[in-house]
Amino acid sequence: MPDNKKPSDKKHPEKPEESERIKRAIEIATKAHEHQLRKTGEPYIIHPLAVKKILEEWQMDEDTIIAGILHDTVEDTDLTLENVKKEFGESVAFLVDGVTKLGQVRKNMKDLDTYLPETRDNFLRLMIATGNDIRVLIIKLADRLHNARTLSALPPDKQKKIALETLEIFAPLADRLNMGRLRVELADLAFSYVDPKRYNYLKNLIEENNKQAAKALKQIEQEVSDLLTKEKIDFEISGRIKSVYSLHKKLAKHNQNLGEIYDLTALRIIVPDITSCYLALGLIHSLYTPMNERIKDYIAKPKQNGYQSLHTTVITKNKKIVEFQIRTREMHEYAERGLAASFYYNEQKLTENYKEGKIQHLPTNLLWITELQDAAAKLKEGKKVDLRKLRLNLFADKIFVYTPKGDIIDLPKGSLPLDFAFRLHSEIGGHVVGVKINGKMSNLNHRLEQGDIVEILTSKNQTPKQSWFDKIFTSHARQKLRQILPKE
Ligand code: MN
């Protein structure tokens, strides 16, 4: 779950009184949504105000906050975009328009399971268009976060649908923006609706593990603290709790073998500068035996979303396996809040800081945004854009595979043939006897890869098996199998 005690959670110390513009926006939105109710029965204005609060917590600029307050007015009330422009200017109007358009495209994607690749391209086209101003996506994410937090008020079928979409589109999007804390909250909230049983099982498992590891961890924390203090390194150390959904994904990747999950217990160390990161790493390795193949230097080589940290997994004297994550305060802020953190400064200042070497995370991050902006500019001029390339970037944890007829099916990375089969149809999923991948006989444990052509072999006499749960990655397929499994 998200850390709650991190300094970035602190209210803006220098936060000014609510500005006249913001007050005016609240007034206008309240009036526009008058008499409208949410599914919870509360006045509708609760929702835009919650979005406002989230955007303030992310320390977004005033225009974004105002657009957040007004984000549902143009679509759902008599207020027009012209009104917004007159009252609050071009920039706010642009943001409101962007959020409204994103909403409309989503409505056309009736069902995530069945929408056509072309529709997804439309969605993507818009994402790219709004990429011109990434703040549109940030407002959309704040909107989604509040809706996910209040899902319980909706009927079950709607809950599932929104939860699934959150899991497949919005959580990955938060990840692409390196908004770690948001990603975790969105994914865990959504997963608890998509597959409640599995969610509760894993949540308990994590809690159990933490309880059992607590004592050993305290001792390790003490040993490391003593050594770092002795070596005069400034540091903060704390436990990092694994999120439910990331454990779910990891288990699927490792054939449900808990013994292969090495980062269930992790300690996070925050130090003042990069040199201290490597010093701390060396000191930890002098205390405990590193598992050599599990050292990751994301400082020298940041993840695509700009994430930076040193990761190492060690075996302690008591044969405990613990992961350490070592990073600077800046890297930590960025990992938790991602792109939103950047808006705390203006872009100019960011670039300046980057040039002066004060921050390291800008390049990969800007690369992605630059890519979006380029694509947006090209689209505006009516030029062609290689959407496939961008799609892979935006949906980094998805793969696209083909039926023998050439239909594209998108699945989460890590999916297996049965996931594919159930995605096609429960009828097919229930009668699987084998699979051909790229024309060759294969087996149901074979992880699908980008671009594979997958042919499912079925037989009328085949019946669904309990043991198939071990050969399934997606909660979608898990659900379908549960539905058709013969009752005992
Ligand atoms: Mn909304």
Image (tube, rainbow, N blue to C red):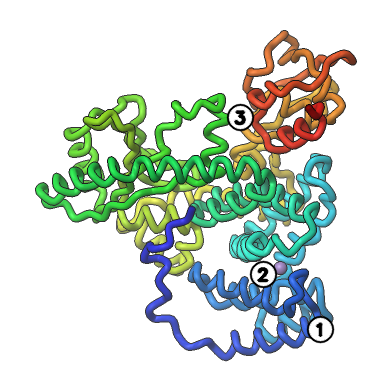
The residue located at (78%, 13%) in the rendering is 433
From the image, tell me which residue sits under label 1: 35
Closer to viewer: mark 3 or mark 1: 1
Q: Is residue 89 left or right of residue 333?
A: right
Q: Quadrant of the C terminus?
A: top right
Label total for image:
3
Q: Is residue 395 left or right of residue 349?
A: right
> Residue pushed farthest front?
488
Does residue 141 appear anywhere in the picture?
yes
Query: Circle 2 — which element?
Result: helix
Residue 95 in percent (x, y) is at 67, 69
For label 1, the crowd category at 10 Å Cα-Cα, with few meaning under 14, some 14 to 19 and many 20 or more, is: few
The residue located at (67%, 52%) in the rendering is 166
Residue 230 in percent (x, y) is at 10, 48
Residue 4 in percent (x, y) is at 43, 62
> Residue pushed farthest right?
460
The residue located at (66%, 83%) in the rendering is 88
Query: Circle 1 — which element?
Result: loop
